[in-house]
Image (tube, rainbow, N blue to C red):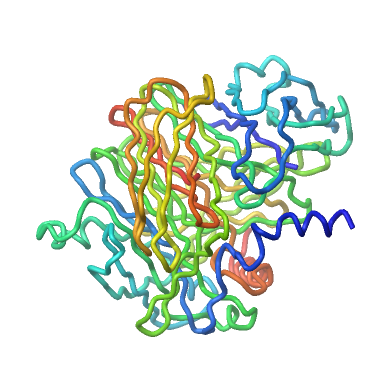
């Protein structure tokens, strides 16, 4: 049951492209027209509405400006492609009956578009457990005149509302705290990394002890003339086979104990 | 009963066809097959992380980096000492400078990065260290590079031998890229072969307007090698589909428009 967010970042507008065809030919899926929905969290509830239909085999671009007047400013727009009708209002994130594949997973194209160019990644968003956490090592910062670096923390949880949580950014070598920010659940939090005092040989460690998120690293030059976007792996991806999530727990325990916040 | 029928129906696609084989030898080091590009327009770098350090181990740690040409033959190997906790960006175009000057390799190929040390924790959890790191590509000297992460555990190294870990399928499979290619852009599609034998691939381009096939590209990829298919002159919205016996023929897509470039995994 995946949702597809519309991203936001400085100098850019977001656009997501939904596809009503499968990414492979061997995992069975529903081959028919599906409903395009918009969901968002506001006032402690999830709100959903129908945006249209998407024929089998087709795709649909949905820009932020297409839906901005349908929801409160600042809320995270979540698209979904479903065979079921979503509850108009609910306390919990609506269950979506949608096509699901595993090798690979169903994706949409999540784009950021400036007046000059576009950057994107193939993504989807599933709700994180509210007790989860985030640990990520980022070697993506770029340094040059008029280059800016951000981390976009994308979170989705079942429970509506926007929890405010602390995000700590450390240097991996010295394990010293470089800066402290806040992030919101059920939202995209844009955090500038340029005021944390990193140099090009530093490896930033981003830690959020109270919330999980997809960490997207976004760099732009000359106010959007050039763009770069990619996410880092979760710590479990440092290994393959075996008890990967045992490994992930070990890494989180180790780094959370080594990196002391304020 | 319903689940049983479902499983039987899926068996021709799943029975003994893992995405990534489990190496027999526990000491095997694993890496993705990353794509390097080098030309007047393209330069590549790799962000190296000290995995042992991230697990809290102390000492001097090294990686073996091995480069394959577009046919899958090894043409350069190097051992690199890792920094502890600092960022370490490898300028691949510079590392391979002499090879490029000598004209012994073309404009793209693959490479793998094997960490010599397996942290105790990884052994304890019956896992293998896997390098799935981040390649950056710089197009036409742009102010910014674009990153793409590895995500296929393709190749293992045990002592001086390589073992390919990609599974193959009994039946041909389609990988349908969920991406809309638009007129005005050019697209390079890179695909690696993580299997032990050469693989035939067919890349079809379909129109979004009427579903018809616009272009078909046939190729064979040697083990450990890559192909780079340039899709130019896109005149209508379209999508691509890759047919092969690889379990997941996931490509890397380079979209070029003017002096700008975007790169991502399928």
Q: Position of residue A174 (x, y in %)?
A: 47, 67
In this view, the residue farthest toward the top is A69
Q: Is residue B61 above or below residue A127?
A: below
Q: As rendered, which of A135 and A177 lies closer to the eye?
A: A135
Q: Is residue A248 above or below residue A147?
A: below
Lateral position of residue A107 relative to residue B203, left or right: right
Picture quadrant of residue B169: bottom right
The answer to whether any part of residue A48 appears in the image is yes
Image point (41%, 66%), residue name: B197
Q: Position of residue A259 (x, y in %)?
A: 59, 65
Q: Quadrant of the C terminus of chain A?
A: bottom right
Q: As rendered, which of B142 and A166 lies closer to the eye?
A: B142
Image point (77%, 44%), residue name: A157
Image point (85%, 31%), residue name: A45
Image point (45%, 65%), residue name: B195
Picture quadrant of residue A210: bottom right
Q: Quadrant of the N terminus of chain A?
A: top right
Q: Is residue B121 above or below residue B232?
A: below
Q: Position of residue B149 (x, y in %)?
A: 46, 53
Q: As rendered, which of A213 and A79 lies closer to the eye?
A: A79
Q: How many marks?
A: 0
Q: As rendered, which of A132 and B5 lies closer to the eye?
A: B5
Lateral position of residue B257 relative to residue A190, left or right: left
Q: Position of residue A61 (x, y in %)?
A: 58, 23
Picture quadrant of residue B127: bottom right
Lateral position of residue B229 relative to residue A233, left or right: left
The answer to whether any part of residue A221 appears in the image is no
């Amino acid at each position: 049951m995946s949702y597809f967010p519309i991203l936001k970042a400085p100098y850019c507008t977001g656009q997501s492209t939904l596809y009503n065809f499968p990414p492979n030919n061997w995992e069975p899926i529903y081959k028919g027209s599906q409903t395009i929905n918009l969901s968002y969290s506001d006032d402690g509830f999830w709100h959903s509405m129908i945006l249209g239909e998407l024929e089998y085999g087709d795709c649909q671009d949905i820009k932020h400006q297409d839906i901005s007047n349908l929801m409160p400013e600042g809320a995270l727009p979540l698209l979904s492609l479903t065979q079921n009708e979503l509850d108009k209002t609910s306390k919990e994130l609506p269950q979506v009956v949608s096509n699901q594949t595993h090798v690979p997973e169903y994706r949409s194209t999540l784009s950021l578009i400036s007046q000059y160019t576009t950057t994107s990644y193939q993504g989807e968003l599933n709700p994180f457990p509210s007790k989860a956490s985030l640990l990520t090592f980022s070697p993506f910062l770029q340094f040059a005149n008029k280059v800016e670096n951000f981390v976009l923390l994308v979170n989705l949880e079942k429970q509506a509302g926007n929890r405010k949580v602390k995000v700590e950014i450390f240097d991996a070598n010295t394990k010293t705290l470089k800066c402290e920010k806040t992030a919101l659940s059920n939202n995209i939090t844009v955090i500038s990394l340029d005021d944390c005092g990193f140099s090009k040989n530093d490896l930033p460690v981003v830690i959020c002890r109270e919330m999980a998120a997809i960490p997207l690293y976004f760099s732009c030059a000359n106010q959007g003339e050039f763009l770069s976007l990619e996410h880092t792996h979760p710590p479990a991806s440092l290994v393959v086979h075996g008890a990967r999530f045992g490994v992930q727990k070990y890494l989180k325990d180790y780094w959370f104990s080594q990196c002391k916040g304020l | 009963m319903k689940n049983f029928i479902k499983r039987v129906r899926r068996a021709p696609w799943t029975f003994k066809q893992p995405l990534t084989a489990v190496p027999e030898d526990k000491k095997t080091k694993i890496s993705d097959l990353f794509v390097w590009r080098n030309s007047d327009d393209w330069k590549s770098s790799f962000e190296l992380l000290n995995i042992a350090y991230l697990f809290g181990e102390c000492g001097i740690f090294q990686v073996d980096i091995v480069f394959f040409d577009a046919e899958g033959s090894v043409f350069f190997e190097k051992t690199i000492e890792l920094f502890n906790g600092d960022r370490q960006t490898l300028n691949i175009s510079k590392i391979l400078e002499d090879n490029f000057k000598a004209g012994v390799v073309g404009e793209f190929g693959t490479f793998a990065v094997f960490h010599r040390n397996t942290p105790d924790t990884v052994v304890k959890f019956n896992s293998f260290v896997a390098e799935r790191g981040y390649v950056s590509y710089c197009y036409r000297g742009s102010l910014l590079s674009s990153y793409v992460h590895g995500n296929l555990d393709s190749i293992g190294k045990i002592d001086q031998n390589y073992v390919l870990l990609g599974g193959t399928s009994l039946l041909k499979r389609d990988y349908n890229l969920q991406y809309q290619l638009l007129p005005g852009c050019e697209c390079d599609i890179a695909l690696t072969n993580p299997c032990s034998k050469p693989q035939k691939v067919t890349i079809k381009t379909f129109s979004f307007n009427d579903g018809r096939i616009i272009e078909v590209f046939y190729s064979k990829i040697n083990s450990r090698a890559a192909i780079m298919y340039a899709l130019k002159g896109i005149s209508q919205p379209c999508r691509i589909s890759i047919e092969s016996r690889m379990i997941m023929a996931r490509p890397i897509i380079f979209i070029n428009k003017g002096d700008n470039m975007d790169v991502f995994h399928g």
